[in-house]
Image (cartoon, rainbow, N blue to C red):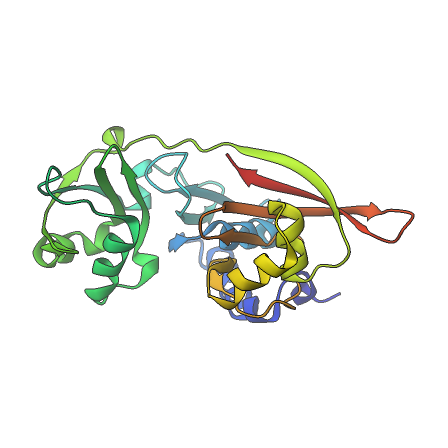
Amino acid sequence: MSIYQHFRNEERSFVDQVLDWKQEVTVQYTYKLTDFLDPRQQDIIKAIIGKDEEISLSFWGGTSYTERKRALLSPTFFELSMSDFQVQAFELRYPRKFITLEHRDVLGSLMGLGLKREKFGDIIIQDEGIQIIAASEVTSFLELNLQKVGQAKVKIVPINNEDIVQTNEEWTEESTTISSLRLDTLLSGMYNISRTKSSLYIERGLVKVNWKTIEDASFQVQEGDYLSVRGFGRSKLISMAGSTKKGKIRILFGRKK
């Protein structure tokens, strides 16, 4: 049985990378620190490493509630500390009374500096305050180059982990029945909207599966996939729970409150 059958074709390169990390840690008795991973990538690592008795797997993204985290793979006899994850949090200071900044403004400015998305974790915006969690290796680069976000001049200031805003968003589990695993059909069932409307969202580039924009309404969703629709929040297809007498698929899914 091939390990690849459990994952999408487009995830094969990441699966190969995880297998290389596993081999490196096992053979060389060293540890491997990854860049920031989205929840789907974290799920893939968990599935591959599993309950390996020789490797310890941990995640950290500044707090236990952050979505994007760095993974640390190490031999089980290694003693690790939080500093080994090399995560640095920052606060953006700017004239809040006169300018409103959104998540996409911050993300766009960071990407505009030439940084890879994997080098920073969550961007937290709450009560008009903005915090950025980044890999320690890009700290100096950010402090030197991030001077403007949107139309606002900003100052980026390092903060301690205990000063990171706790954003504990809870998931609720729900179930419904759908006729197929087409993306438009699934969104219609999960968000209680018409297929026509869900197709429009897809065509307009407002839908992502596993953090990638999908513009094909017939795209087949699989167990474990994360979905998001702009304006509707995020959801996850947890499992297929059998079928009804009329041949519909019963699904269990999670949604963020």
* Residue 161 x %, y %: 26, 33
**Image quadrant in which you'd find residue 124:** top left
Say left or right for 29 vs 108: right
Quadrant housing the N terminus: bottom right
Q: Nearer the viewer, residue 181 or 82?
A: 181
In percent of the image, x 45 and y 33: which residue is there? 169
| Residue 52 appears in the figure | no
Q: Nearer the viewer, residue 194 or 28?
A: 194
Q: Nearer the viewer, residue 203 or 45?
A: 203
In percent of the image, x 87 and y 46: which residue is there? 244
Q: In this picture, is 101 found above or below 217? A: above
* Residue 212 x %, y %: 48, 63
Say left or right for 204 vs 94: right
Most extreme residue toward the right is 245
* Residue 90 x %, y %: 19, 42
**Image quadrant in which you'd find residue 173:** top right
* Residue 209 x %, y %: 53, 59
